[in-house]
Image (tube, helix red, strand yellow):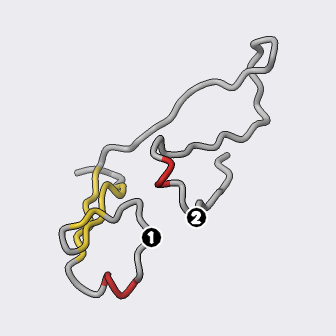
Amino acid sequence: MADEWFLSRVYTHGRDITDSPVDRRELSEGVRVVLTDKASRITGTVVDQRGQPIDDFVVMVFPADERLWGDQKFFRVA
């Protein structure tokens, strides 16, 4: 059994609403939440103009599909 679980998908009435704004009234019944033990990870190095690694930066990640950008919530990851 996995030590940690992560959200994979959320469906309501057979429609994937994982990345969609939803009126909470749509969630009164017929909601299926799919969890996974596979974590997504993004790795890399941020460098300055000389190619030297820097440690004071902010990285923002967006879906490739601009329609999913919507009302983004931003938070800092240490």
Q: Which comes before the other along the chain, label 1 or label 2?
A: 1
Point out which mark residue 71 bears.
Answer: 2
Q: Is residue 7 above or below residue 51?
A: below
Measure the alpha-carbon separation of dots 1 and 2: 9 Å
The amino acid type of the residue labelled 2 equals: Asp
**Left or right: residue 27 compared with residue 54:** left
- Percent x, y for residue 4? 36, 53
- Percent x, y for residue 41? 46, 38
Q: Residues within 10 Å of mark 2 (few under 14, many from 20)?
A: few
Give the residue drawn at x 36%, y 55%.
6
Point out which mark residue 21 bears.
Answer: 1
* Helix, strand or loop under label 1: loop
Give the residue drawn at x 76%, y 31%.
55
Give the residue drawn at x 67%, y 46%.
78
Which residue occupies the foreground of this view, 73 or 3?
Answer: 73
Q: Is residue 46 above or below residue 36?
A: above
Q: Is residue 18 above or below residue 63?
A: below
Q: Are marks 1 and 2 in contact (CB under 8 Å)?
A: yes
Q: Quadrant location of residue 14?
A: bottom left
